[in-house]
């Protein structure tokens, strides 16, 4: 690891400004006001020149300028690239319905399988994002200084999206009958996050109720903590130490899984090993605290949007007749429905639970039910071009195309071109010919998000990120852990998982779900 790693500054007053209940905070991506903004030179400030605070965004490459000027012509080009029916639209045949999009290979030619991932990788990645970054103030297309923009999550993989600010500050997240446990409820058949009478989730991050899968993952993490509490108590740990011991056990197993399973799937083992053994080259906030760089938050880590399929099988027996519940990830027909036909969150009904055997490979007889992830490429599933405003965030405004929003975010943050960063890293520099027709040099000065997707597709077959995107993602994840005084990499680098698992000394997502009691073997559903 490069440089000295000081003790990470723990968030102080900034946490007091953070909203932890759904419906009380601002929108996920902030208000939308597309305009030319200020020139990059006007953004430089004394704050930006100093070490980036932990509760602000920052830059990995502060000396590289924006990829293109922020003007009406470039905004129009980015909007066109990201529009429904545009070059990024996978043009899924939605008319065949959510079932045939999954079961008939002829309907998924533009969304091919990733043979190294299962479908749950997408939503685990979304959960991880919500554990370390939340921008509620910047405006799409309006040039903004990252250093002046609050990050409403702690820049650490510490599960503050589950634990909130702790039992004293956020008692509503904890079981009043047993305050060392987190609050969990039932949706009729199986677990559901706790909810207010209007359906609003009572959780630490409102985004973890955006869709049924992320809501189910939040509930699984709650049950995981509660199961660890039971194990810690059974070990004879003094009552006064049960919560802290359980939280540390949960967090360290979660972090170990991120490094040894998730990052390996996304970036490849060789790159992960290189960063761990040879150190970080580009994400080096020392001697300051850890922060989230916009090259990661606004571009590289948004690769997960490419892995989203148009529809999923939420479970195999959820419908009233015992049949499987299939749904589009988002469907306009679901707007206002008490039990939507799609997989949006924010609702409680008997069938709205997750059968995790669809999303992860539990082995044995369960493997037959597992579904694969989509490869990482420049095609985005069609439903993501028509997001419900509620899925974007409270008070959100158009554009409703996720691709357009991601591309305009590059103007907000003045993110350098993918080619510039690849060249700086010494990687192969790609020409992106499909962007040449816009006449503003996007083929050689490509938005980093698009470049990362193209690099993954063209250099890694879509199975993992390419060298540039993978390096950004791996260095930020590992750096956040190395700079966190409480993480296993910093506090206990010799840590090895101790909870029950399929293989001693290992721990993956399947092990977590099994220990939490939400794996398929505990559902008592027919095979």
Image (cartoon, helix red, strand yellow):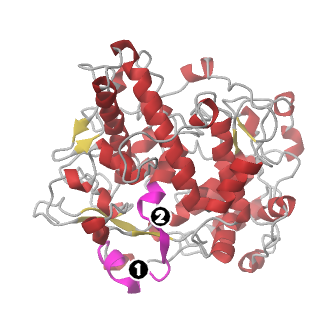
Residue 458, quarter of picture? bottom right
Q: Residue furthest left?
A: 321
Q: Look at the image and tell me in which quarter the N terminus lies.
A: top right
The foreground one among 106 and 290 is 290
Quadrant position of residue 81: bottom right
Q: Position of residue 438 (x, y in %)?
A: 76, 74
Classify mark 1: helix, strand or loop.
loop
Q: Position of residue 281 (x, y in %)?
A: 80, 49
332 or 298: nearer the viewer: 298
Q: Is residue 86 magenta?
A: no
What percent of the width, then of the height, locates residue 58? 74, 39
Q: Tell me the crowding category of disc 1: few under 14, some 14 to 19, or many 20 or more residues within 10 angstroms, Cα based.
A: some
Q: Quadrant of the C terminus?
A: bottom left
Residue shown at 65% from the left, 64% from the top: 79
Q: Given contact means CB atoms under 8 Å apart, are the residues at marks 2 and 1 in contact?
A: no
Q: Is residue 418 above or below residue 225?
A: below
Magenta-colored span: 98-123
Q: Position of residue 185 (x, y in %)?
A: 23, 36
Q: Earlier in the sequence, mark 2 or mark 1?
A: 1
Q: Give the foreground label among 2 and 1.
A: 2
22 or 517: nearer the eye? Answer: 517
Residue at image point 44% right, 32% down: 249
Residue beneath disc 1? 93
Q: CA gap, disc 2 to disc 1? A: 15 Å
The residue at 62%/57% (across/down) is: 406
Q: Which mark is residue 308?
A: 2
């Amino acid at each position: 690891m490069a440089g000295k790693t000081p003790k990470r500054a723990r968030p102080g007053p900034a946490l007091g400004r953070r909203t932890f209940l759904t419906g009380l905070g601002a929108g996920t991506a902030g208000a939308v006001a597309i305009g030319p903004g200020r020139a990059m030179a006007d953004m430089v400030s004394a704050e930006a020149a100093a070490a980036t605070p932990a509760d602000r965004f920052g830059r990995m490459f502060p000396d590289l300028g924006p990829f293109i000027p922020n003007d009406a012509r470039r905004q129009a080009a980015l909007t066109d690239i990201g529009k429904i029916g545009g070059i990024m639209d996978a043009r899924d045949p939605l008319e065949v319905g959510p079932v045939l999009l999954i079961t008939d290979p002829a309907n998924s030619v533009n969304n091919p399988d990733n043979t190294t991932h299962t479908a749950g990788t997408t939503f685990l990645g979304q959960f991880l994002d919500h554990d370390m970054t939340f921008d509620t103030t910047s405006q799409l297309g309006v040039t903004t200084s990252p250093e002046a923009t609050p990050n409403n999550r702690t820049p650490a993989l510490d599960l503050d999206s589950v634990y909130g600010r702790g039992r004293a500050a956020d008692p509503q997240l904890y079981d009043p009958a047993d305050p060392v446990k987190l609050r969990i409820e039932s949706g009729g058949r199986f677990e559901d996050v706790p909810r207010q009478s209007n359906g609003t989730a009572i959780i630490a991050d409102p985004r973890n109720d955006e869709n049924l899968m992320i809501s189910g993952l939040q509930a699984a993490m709650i049950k995981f903590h509660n199961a660890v509490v039971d194990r810690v108590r059974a070990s004879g740990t003094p009552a006064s130490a049960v919560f802290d011991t359980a939280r540390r056990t949960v967090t360290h197993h979660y972090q170990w899984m991120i490094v040894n399973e998730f990052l390996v799937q996304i970036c490849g083992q060789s790159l992960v090993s290189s960063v761990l053994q040879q150190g970080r080259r580009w994400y080096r906030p020392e001697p300051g605290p850890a922060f989230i760089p916009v090259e990661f938050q606004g571009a590289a880590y948004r690769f997960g949007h490419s892995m989203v399929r148009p529809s999923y099988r939420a479970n195999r027996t959820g419908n009233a007749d015992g049949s499987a519940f299939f749904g589009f990830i988002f469907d306009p027909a679901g707007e206002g429905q008490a039990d939507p036909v799609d997989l949006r969150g924010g609702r409680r009904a008997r069938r709205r639970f997750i059968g995790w055997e669809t999303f992860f490979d539990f082995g044995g007889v369960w493997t037959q039910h597992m579904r694969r992830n989509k490869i990482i490429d420049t095609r985005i599933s069609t439903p993501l071009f028509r997001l419900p405003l509620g899925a974007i965030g409270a008070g959100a405004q158009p554009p409703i195309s996720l691709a357009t929003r991601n591309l305009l975010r590059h103007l907000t943050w003045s993110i350098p071109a993918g080619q510039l960063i690849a060249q700086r890293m010494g990687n192969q520099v790609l020409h992106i010919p499909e962007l040449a027709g816009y006449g503003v040099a996007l083929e050689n000065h490509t938005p980093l998000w698009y470049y990362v997707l193209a690099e993954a597709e063209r250099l890694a077959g879509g199975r993992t990120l390419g060298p540039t995107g993978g390096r950004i993602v791996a260095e930020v994840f590992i750096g956040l852990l190395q700079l966190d005084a409480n993480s296993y990499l910093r506090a206990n680098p010799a840590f090895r998982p101790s909870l029950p698992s399929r293989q001693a000394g290992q721990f993956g997502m399947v092990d977590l779900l099994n220990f939490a009691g939400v794996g398929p073997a505990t559902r008592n559903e027919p095979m």
